Structure formats: structure tokens, C-alpha cells
Amino acid sequence: MSPNQSFELCLRMGDNALILGQRLAEWCGHGPILEQDIALTNISLDLIGQSRLWLSLAGQIEGQGRDEDKLAFFRDSNEFRHLNLCEQPNGHWGTTLMRQFLFDAFHLPLLEQLCKVEDQQVASIAQKSVKEVRYHLRWSSEWVVRLGAGTDESHEKMQQALLDVWPFAGEAIQPNAFDLELTETCPPYNVQAVNKAWWSSVNEVFNQANLDVPEANWAPQKGREGIHTERLGFILAEMQFLPRAYPDAQW
Amino acid sequence: MHSGEWSVELIHSWLAAVKDPEIPVLNIHDLGVLRSIEMLDAETVRITITPTYSGCPAMNTIANDVRRLLKSKGIPKVEVLESLQPPWTTDCLSPQAHAKLEAFGIAPPQTGSPDKTALFSEAVTVPCPQCKSRNTQLISQFGSTACKALYRCSDCHEPFDYFKCLR
């Protein structure tokens, strides 16, 4: 993996984890029951921890003196490389779970691919993260099934949540030029394997949850190229305010 | 103490005083997070630790505690590095750690039962650390810290933490 490729990949992985982690943290103190409030904040913590590893490596590779905090707090929206799925609002509990499941089903096979690449620093972070993300996918899958195959009302809300979130899911599995380049130059990484694993989880879980899988007509999204929805600005305003207002603030 | 009067063995024994801030019955040897102790020169010691979970805030506390302890023992320069390779798993816990966890009221990871399998694997049976009953149920895969799940005993009705298996 060339330094440029590795930098780009670290930003993508780090930004996905950072922005989704920040979103999930909004649930802190608002979960429907204490145990699930704790579950979501645990997942948020895992993601922010992973983000720190990825962005710290990105900063090292770049060699311009930016550490993980500089990258998280002092970039503007067009410099973020995450999927637009990650920045979509939490909605209700079912919407959050649906977004989480569609992301986890992509995140796990992607990390499994990255565990095997030659770049040892990238592989190390992937090997660390993959163990945590297995728990995330299991948890979100179980909740999608519990609610999708639950009462009439929970089923209806989950089907609607799926319709709401679905248009943003396509970006995760539609390879762009960078994914194709990595597949070509960094075997055994293979973007098609991620795509296949995602569909397999999606079909299995939605089948068990009695949810209809919508047509694969995705909204065109270019989060990975830095073109985000209007949601991101609000997240950054909240997340970056303090370090930007007090740049030398320390814990 | 003057430079050169400390050995790797001595430092190793000192570090037994550094505890997990969340689970104070385990020290860093029990946790299996201490990877190496190196004497770089007469004044500098490098300690390498590995994180349990990526976001575990205990790692910062542990690194600070290591620094503070070794400084207090008279070592002028202490470097604490984090290494991810090989990744930590619950197999890194010392044999004593399991008994210490159980005595503290936290069910130790069930060895030989990697409960990580995505998508509806069978849940593992976790015996209650209070009454030892095997009639327990999972409340949440995510508990009070990143490394724990929450269970309840159906016999003594006590909720308890389970140090979940990570492999």
C-alpha cells in the first residue's frame, strides 16, 4: 500500500468511526432502557477508540504534524471521508438500529479484508477493531430481528426506518475509483468480497425480521470524496466547537 | 537509587502495583497488557503495553500510573508505548485473573467458548459468580465497561458483570 493509499484509507476508516461514534454518543442518557443506553454508548466508545487509532496513523503517514485530535477537530466538512450513512440523524430507536445494522454489516467484512493486507500498521488496527465489531453486528442484527419480527407497530416502524435509511446504504457497497485501485494493488483486499458479505447479512437478517428488502436504487452519495449532506455541518459544529474556541485546551 | 541499579526483574515486580482502574483486583500482569520492559540506557526505561479495547479509557490511566510509579522509584526517564500487535484477547489474562475476577463478583470469560460469532450464535452459559448457579441469562452484550456484558442470575436474582470472551 502506498503512503497515499494508506493515508486515504485511514481517513475513511477513522472518519466513519468518528462520525458514527459521535452520532451514537447523542443517545447517552436517552436510551429506552438503561442497558441499551449503555450498549449504544459502549459501541460509540469502541468506534471513537478505533477512530483514534486510524487518525493517529493517518497523521503519522502524512508527516505534517497533525495528530488524531488535529484531524478530528480542525478539518472542515469537505475534508471528511466517511460514508454519508454515518452522519444521518438518529431518528427513533429503530432508525438508529437500522443505520447501525447496515453499517456494521459493511464494517465487519471490510475489517476482515484489511486484517489480511500487507501493510502491518493497517492490518494491526483492523485486527484490533474486528473483534469489537463482531459484537456490534451481532447486537444490531438481533435488535433488527426482535423489532422487525415483533409487534405490528414495531414491524411497521422498522420497515419505515429501513426505507428512510436505505438510500444512504448503497454508498457503502458501491466501489468508487479508490476501492477498485486498492483491490487491484493490495491483494488479498477485495471490495467485491465486502459487497457480497454485506448482501448476505442483509438478506439473512431482513428475512428473519420479516422486512422487505427495498430495490437497490440508491441515492447517489459522495461522502468518500468529501461531498456530504447538510447533516455533517451540525455534527461538526457541536463536536469541534470547544477545541476551535480554545485551541490549547487540555483535560 | 542510582542509575543502573534497577533490573527488568525488579521493574516487573514493581509494576504489580499498577491496577486496572475499573477492576482494582487485577494488576497489569493479571490483565496481560504489559508487553515488554526495556532498559534503553542508564536513565531510560521503555514500557510497552497493549490496549484491551480500542476505546478503553483505562489505558491512559494505566500509562500514567506506570509513569508515576517508576518516577517515584527514581527512574529519570520513562517511556510508555502502546503496541497493537499481536492484538489483546482474553487469553492474555493470567490464570490467577480468572479466580480474582470471580472472587470480586465478575464472571470470568468462559474459555473455549468464543461468544463473538456474528449473527445469532448460541449464547454461552455463564455461571453466577455469587451462587455458582448455571441458570443465568444475558441482559445485554454491553455492560458497565467495554470489556463486560451484563447478566442476571435466575436463581439468586442478582445481576452481575461478565468479562466477555474476546478472541
Image: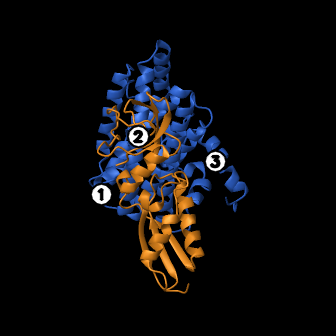
**Nearer-N-terminus badge (3/1):** 1
Marks 3 and 2, Cα distance to the nearest angstrom? 26 Å
For disc 2, the marked residue is: A135
Q: Which chain did the renderer colour orange?
A: B
What's under tag 3, amino acid-wise? Met
Q: Position of residue A29 (x, y in %)?
A: 63, 35
Front in this rendered view, residue A38 or A52 = A38
Q: Is residue B75 left or right of residue B103?
A: right
Q: Nearer the viewer, residue A74 or A78?
A: A74
Colouring used for the render: by chain
The residue located at (26%, 53%) in the rendering is A188
Check disc 1 and report the residue beneath it. A185
- Which residue is at 44% across, 17% downward? A150
Using the image, name the chain to which the residue with label 3 belongs: A
* Kind of residue indicated by mark 1: Thr
In front: label 3 or label 1: 3
Q: Residue at x 46, y 70 (%)?
A: B13
Q: Are marks 3 and 2 in contact (CB under 8 Å)?
A: no
Chain letter for the residue marked with disc 1 in the picture:
A
Question: Is residue A218 visible to us here?
Answer: no
